[in-house]
Amino acid sequence: MADKLIIFDTTLRDGEQSPGASMTRDEKLRIARQLERLRVDVIEAGFAASSNGDFEAVQAIANAIKDSTVCSLSRANDRDISRAAEALKGANSGRIHTFIATSPLHMEKKLRMTPEQVLEQAKQSVRFARNLVADVEFSPEDGYRSDMDFLCQVLEAVIAEGATTINVPDTVGYAVPELYGQFIKTLRERIPNSDKAIWSVHCHNDLGMAVANSLAGVKLGGARQVECTINGLGERAGNCSLEEIVMAVKTRKDYFGLEMNIDPVHIVAASRMVSQTTGFVVQPNKAVVGANAFAHASGIHQDGVLKARDTYEIMRAEDVGWSNNKIVLGKLSGRNAFKQRLQELGVMLESESELNAAFTRFKELADRKSEIFDEDILALVSEESVTQDKEQYAFVSLTQHSETGERPQASIVFTVSGKEVHGKSDGNGPVDASLKAIESIVDSGAEMVLYSVNAISGSTESQGEVTVRLQNSGRVVNGVGADPDIIVASAKAYLSALNKLQSKADRVAAQG
Ligand code: KIV
Ligand code: ZN
């Protein structure tokens, strides 16, 4: 049997821990479906015991996903593990991932536990989890900074209790490739029952080496599972990026010699979906999924690629889902052409009514913009899905006036729980005036910590995509809005961020 690398995606759990990246249950479900299309082996859907919202998201994903294993994180205690098992009940294939810190620093300062207590709790938790599900992963948090002898003792004990996967996190992104690879190798060599579990790597990107460290864990250490996120989303500098791992292992099969289940043609759509849902823009020079990843600007390169593509290209853009045919639709395109293009982009709308609503918006956009690019369609669909989530605030219309030497004025109409309201304000610029017009009604008390504009398809004809990050009472959220008019896009992004703040506040209130 071919040697296989398991791809474990944690966008919906570790990725979501990134400030502002929190997602609603329906957003997570959409991303989970895209991950299933991408054929990831394991989807870590959330941390069921952390909130009612997370529990519901894990449960919904467990019920909907058929082809990937669905996993919930849980701390190493009976309550968390029981909640995870409960949320995973409907899964075709469910996994409990339990963890406890093992580094001297974490045990002493964070857990205030002795190594003996940590060892006991790790064993007890894996035993408890194995009575509920057959597939149990154990992670020693801050594993890479743990004492080797102690780590060997803990990992040998949890394998004896039935852990089926052992994941070794570099929680703070401190590792370097050779040492991390050697670390995994030493663990596997020293632990007598190491062959009873699959070994997994989980690297953070604080020093920009998460992908390199993970690959070293695979090549030198013999790990056969990589934990990663779409676009490398994650706390601080992020996690190991799925698209980079997958394409490295695939492109350099000569070196790694490993098979994967992944169907890379869905990578770009997954990247877009995660970026548009979370408001974390992908840098243009990001490997595989950045706008420039396959663009050749220099004359020498262009000439070479035209003569023989592999002079300067090691992967084919189409293989990861970049379409050759960029201009796809226009105002004369029909519903079937629209539906087919959505399918080609890997977007499945859940119902006919969602498709109809998206098509209506496509026609509205096509009236204002002659060429509709794939990027426009993806933005439109992700906005459509957000609108379907019955949000508290929804954009209706905006007028604004700005003139050199005059203070800009804006009037906005939007709905609050379905009822139309009108706001007016002036401001430093038209965007400022429009957002203040919203605040003249909402008075949210939120502080704006980030505002960014991106041209979706790279020309002045394109839609502007705006991300707004708001902070209130310790909660941080991102809102995203797209429109050919960037002032309207800004208002939509602001309302979307207010909706997220509201839904977070509701979730906190529901937990008591
Ligand atoms: O980085 C980390 O240590 C984690 C564990 C919970 C697996 O995310
Ligand atoms: Zn992590």
Image (cartoon, helix red, strand yellow):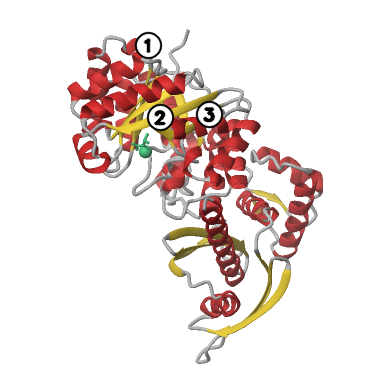
Q: For marks 2 and 1, give the one nearer the viewer.
A: 2
> What's the residue at 55%, 53% (across, down)?
507
Asked if residue 282 lies left or right of residue 209, the reply is right
Task: Please name the residue that numbered disc 1 is placed on.
Answer: 196
Task: Please name the residue that numbered disc 3 is placed on.
Answer: 85
Give me the C-alpha separation between circle 2 and circle 1.
Answer: 18 Å
Where is residue 200? Give x, y as percent: 37, 24
In the structure shown, which secondary structural element does the residue marked by tag 2 occupy? strand
| Ligand 1 lies under 8 Å from the Cβ of mark 3 | no
Position above or below: 338 against 41 = below
Query: Residue 485, can we see it?
Result: yes
Give me the C-alpha separation between circle 2 and circle 3.
Answer: 11 Å
Q: Earlier in the sequence, mark 2 or mark 3?
A: 3
In the structure shown, which secondary structural element does the residue marked by tag 1 occupy? helix
Q: Are marks 2 and 1 in contact (CB under 8 Å)?
A: no
Question: Which residue is at the front of the view, 181 or 338?
Answer: 181
